[in-house]
Amino acid sequence: MAAYLIAHLNVTNPDAFEAYRTAVPAVIAAHGGRYLIRGGAAEALEGDWIVPRLIVLEFPDKAAAEGFYNSPEYQEILPLRLANAEGSVAIVDGFTG
């Protein structure tokens, strides 16, 4: 079953964040992941939508998503994100219907 890594971020230092943004796609791909959403424009239809940047990654399964997040390659670049953006990240199981 597919799993999704969902992040909402507020980039606080765009210039320094660029190094993370450039490095992370190769690490995602190496773990079988792909972007579904990468910070595109969002329009609130209901309620208060306070998510400056939304990212949704799809992985083949939860193990692959966790493998990406916990990999040495990602852990090496993670401090770039943590130092230059605020937000939350979660892994969500897909729906099999």
Image (tube, rainbow, N blue to C red):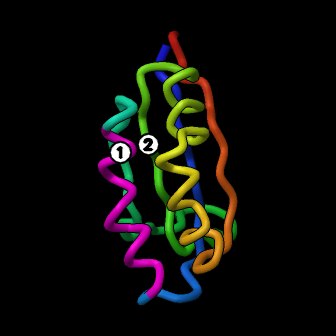
| Vertical placement of residue 83 versus 66, above or below | below
At 39% from the left and 56% from the top, the residue drawn is 24
Which image quadrant for residue 88?
bottom right
Horizontal side of 30 relative to 4 (left or right) equals left
Q: Residues within 10 Å of mark 1 (few under 14, many from 20)?
A: few
Q: Secondary structure at mark 1?
A: strand
At 53% from the left and 57% from the top, the residue drawn is 76
Where residue 97 appears, x then y in whole percent?
52, 10
Question: Which of the numbered marks, if any, corresponds to residue 36?
Answer: 1
Residue highlighted by disc 2: 57
| Vertical placement of residue 42 versus 57, above or below | below
Q: Are marks 1 and 2 in contact (CB under 8 Å)?
A: yes
Q: Secondary structure at mark 2?
A: strand
Question: What is the three-letter code of the residue carrying label 2?
Answer: Leu
Where residue 3 appears, x then y in whole percent?
52, 27
Q: Secondary structure of the magenta portion, mostly?
A: helix
Which image quadrant for residue 46?
bottom right
- The one of 80 and 5 positioned closer to us in this rendering: 80
Give the alpha-carbon distance from disc 1 to disc 2, as whole Å. Answer: 6 Å
Residue numbers of the magenta segment? 16-29
